[in-house]
Structure formats: C-alpha cells, structure tokens
Image (cartoon, grey):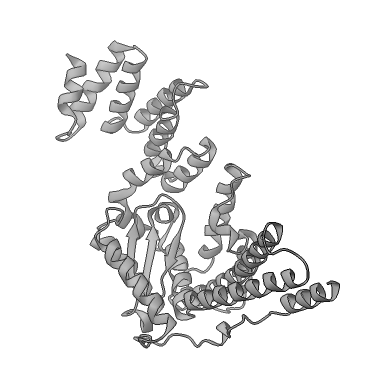
Amino acid sequence: MKNFFLIIIIFLTSCSTPIGGAKKIEDIKPEETPSIETIEAGLWMQMNNYEEKLKTSGSRVKDKSLEKYLKNILCTLTPDYCKDIRVYVQDMPYFNAFMAPNGMMVVWTGLLLRAQNEAQVAAVIGHEAGHYIKRHSLKAWLDAKSRTDLMAILAIGLAVGGVPSGGDIFNLTQLLQAGFMAKHSRDNEREADKIGLDLLIKGGYDPKEAPKIWENIIKEMELGEVNKPLAFLASHPAPEERIKNLKKQTQSYENFETKKNEKELKQKTSPHLKKWVKDEMRLKNKVEQTEFVIDLVYGDNKNEYLLKFYKGEIYRLRGDIENNFQKAIDLYKESIKLKDDFADVYKELGLLQLKIEKDKKAKKNLQRYLDLAINPKDKSIIESYLN
C-alpha cells in the first residue's frame, strides 16, 4: 500500500506537462477556424450559442459607440486578430473580463467603472487577447479532461489497495483535481499577462498603468471583508505577484511610449457612470470599500461635487443606523457648496429630510430640484410631496 501511494505521489508531482499534451497546442492563426470534427469546434459551437443569446440579452450594454471604442483598442493592440475578436460590454458590477475560444470577449461594467484611463483598459483587453491567441480555453478543457481521467485511475487504484473509493477519498481526489486545475489556470494567466503587456507596449500605451490596476484591486480588497477575497483569485496569480512580474517585464524594455488617454475613456463611459455607480452601491460592500471605488471615478477636483453626492448616497442607502442619515445630509450640503445647480442632490436631500420629518427644509429642496431639473420623469411625484 505504501509503495502504491509512493508511485502515485511521484507521478503527480512530475506532471510538469499536462496529460494529453495541451501545452503542445500551437497558437491560433489569424482568421483560423477549427475543423468540424475537433473538440475545439465543439467548444466554439457552445460559445457561439452563448454569444447569440448575449447579443439580445438585457444584461448587454447596447452602446455601439462604447463597444466600437473597445474594439478599436483591441485592433490597436493586435491588428492581426482584429477581425477575429468581437467585444461586448455586460452590465455586471464586478471587476472582470473574459475571453471565449470562439473570439467573443466580454468586459464587465465594474471593470470599466474602476479603470482610470484607456491604458488600463488596454492592459486588460491585451491580456484577454493573449488567452485567445494561446488557445487557453482549449488547453484548460484538455487539462480538465486529463485530470478527470487521472483522478478516476487514482480512485480505482486506492480501492484496489484496500481504501474505499467513497467518502474522504472522493474528497481527496476532488481536492487534488482542483489544485491541478488552479495551478494550470494560474500558469495561463501569467502567460496572458506577459502577452498583454507586450501588446500594450507595442500599441504605444504606458505599461506602468498595467500594475496600477492590481494595486487598486489590492487596496479595495484590504478595505473589504478580508475573509471574502475576490472569487477569480483562486485561479489567478496573487495581485502582488502580478504587480512584481509586470514591473519586471516593463524594465526589460529600453524605450516605450506613455499614452494613457484618460479623457476619451471618460467620454465613452460618462453616459453610464450614474447607473454603474448606483449598481456598485447596491452591492452594499463595506463603506470604505465603496468609497474607494467612488474615489477612483470622481477623485479629481473637477468632479468633487459628485464625489460628495455619491458618498452621501452610500450612507443614505444603508438606512438610519450609526447616524447614517445625518452623514448623508452633511455630504449633500458639501456637494451643494461645490456646485449649487446640480439637481439630483436637492432631490435626495429633500426626500431624506422629508423622511426624518424636516418638512419645511425638505419642501424647499424639492422645489429647488424641480426648478433645476429638465423635464424630470418624477415631476408629478415630487409635486405631490409639495402640496
């Protein structure tokens, strides 16, 4: 029995190349499609079906200008694969993007909300393009299939050796399989990071912006629940490792440009920021964590009145505990001092004052809202509070 375990351990720890030769798969060529009889064609078919549903899904942000903007970034980074990759924006308030094997790239709104400039968005898009070029989805599938077969062999071998295949042994094989897959996922992520940074530099963007994304993620995590790390980190390298690797890779380049394009990104996302910020607040993460995200969006002097307003919203939405309503009112008033013709702040201040029975002040602020707002949809409702 001991000899059997020893053989298994040696075999498992020597698997530097995935069973099934997944790492021997060549990069996908521009405009290449898989043969109909292959496993890869099956993966493409599944994702083609998903993509068709996404096109008409209510979760898709149907903003052609924004999607074209992101597609143009992709084409700047990798012109050879410009025709092969489609970019969609999905209304999900989390930091994430993913690449499907059929050329479908999906960027979540939570990522766009946190990006401070185009270079940071380009770093993510280049990373996802790296997954596509290296056929990481196919490699992951083949590795998973191989590991599943391996674990079945392990379970049978343990049973033959006198150990039952159910109970704790089943949990052991699951744990081993999960560990292998996480390792290979992290290896793929490291490879995509390297490709993404190369594409970023060749595209003329500032490579120093790539590690900044992860520096901000670390800060956001530290302000949140320490026992609730971001789910994707299970299969991704630690942010600290990514930062170190990206900075080291940047140093290997003697010359690079420093394009950031902060203004254009803000122009493309500005029509959606109000909704995205509200979606972020509805997650009800820790106050400090949500404030950090709002700071990324409105931390400049030009938009400080919005920063104060939305921080007031954070406290208002959490209910009247720990003096939250008074904190919200104070922040609304600070916003008004910075910009006295912003309609939304008067509405929320007035409604909150009405809620805590400060009727006279509430009506004054609600009337100010009606005076400033242009054709507000809630006009009749607000007027009913004034009468």
What residue is at 32 percent from the left and 72 percent from the top? 48
What residue is at 39 percent from the left and 61 percent from the top? 107
Count the marks: how many?
A: 0
Q: Nearer the viewer, residue 100 or 95?
A: 100
Q: Is residue 69 visible?
A: yes
What residue is at 72 percent from the left and 69 percent from the top? 159
| Residue 14 x/y as whole percent | 73, 80
Query: Looking at the figure, which quarter contains the N terminus?
Result: bottom right
Residue 52 sits in quarter? bottom left
| Residue 82 x/y as whole percent | 34, 79
| Residue 93 x/y as whole percent | 41, 49
Height in image: 161 above or below 231? Answer: below
Query: Looking at the figure, which quarter contains the C terminus?
Result: top left
Drawn side of residue 359 relative to residue 109, left or right = left
Height in image: 165 above or below 291? Answer: below
Q: Nearer the viewer, residue 207 or 149?
A: 149
Drawn side of residue 286 relative to residue 272, left or right = right
Drawn side of residue 105 relative to residue 209, left or right = left
Q: Residue furthest right?
A: 2
Residue 225 sits in quarter? top right
Q: Is residue 256 visible?
A: no
| Residue 252 x/y as whole percent | 61, 78
Q: Nearer the viewer, residue 191 or 300?
A: 191
Residue 65 sits in quarter? bottom left
